[in-house]
Amino acid sequence: MAKLHITTTINGDATEFLCEPEQTLLDVLRDELQLTGSKEGCASGDCGACSVMLDGRLVCACLVLGAEAAGRTVETIEGVARGEELHLVQRKFLEHHALQCGVCTPGFIVAAKALLERDTDPSETEVRYWLAGNLCRCTGYDKIVRAVLDAAAEMRGEEAGA
């Protein structure tokens, strides 16, 4: 089969690529576009390590075909920071030591950012529910949840621990 020519927007930039019809968006991002921040953890949509935003919706890139990105907007972990300036969620992950091996971290950050763009005052239960599609084998989740809650508090202008 012939490769497909896809035009899309990735992290705010107009992007074109060629892909096989059966190639996943994750494979396109990593192998064709060298955006290697999204990780393949399971290839079945169970771990969230490959989480990206597709037209403002959180998806597992391992479950989306690269061709499905045609004419759409994709946001990856590489688009979260603005140049050298880390996004608030990234800073809070560092402050709270909410990462260890780093395989799951990009997916958690993309998911947490998506949550806080929708709700800057989530409860702990809501954070845990929102992040339930992301698995981590190292941190035990508490530091991740605390980082997200702290980012939310700062977004609301509150002091840490208030």
Image (spheres, rainbow, N blue to C red):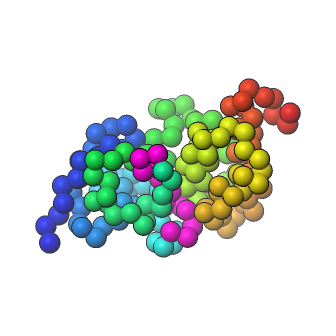
Does residue 48 belong to the magenta stretch?
yes
Q: Is residue 155 visible?
A: yes
Where does residue 64 sit, x and y in percent of width and height? Answer: 39, 63
Which quadrant is the N terminus positioned in? bottom left
**Residue that sits furthest to the left in the current view:** 2
Q: Position of residue 132 (x, y in %)?
A: 65, 62
* Whether residue 91 is visible: no
Main secondary-structure element of the magenta-colored stretch: loop
The answer to which quarter of the image holds residue 9 is top left
In-image side of 99 versus 17 (left or right)? right
Which residue is at 36% across, 55% downward? 29
> x and y percent of residue 130 in the render?
65, 55
The relative height of residue 146 versus residue 138 in the rendered view (above or below) is above
How many discs appear?
0
- Frontmost residue, 27 versus 128: 128
Residue 141: x and y in percent read 73, 59
User: Image point 81% across, 29% down: which residue?
Assistant: 159
Q: Nearer the viewer, residue 150 or 86?
A: 150
152 vs 83, left or right, is right
In the displayed image of the protein, which residue is found farthest to the right?
A: 162
Is residue 89 inside the magenta stretch? no
Quadrant location, the C terminus = top right
Residue at screen point 28% across, 47% down: 71
The residue most toward the top is: 157
Q: Which residues are magenta?
A: 45-56
Q: Residue at x 49, y 32 (%)?
A: 82
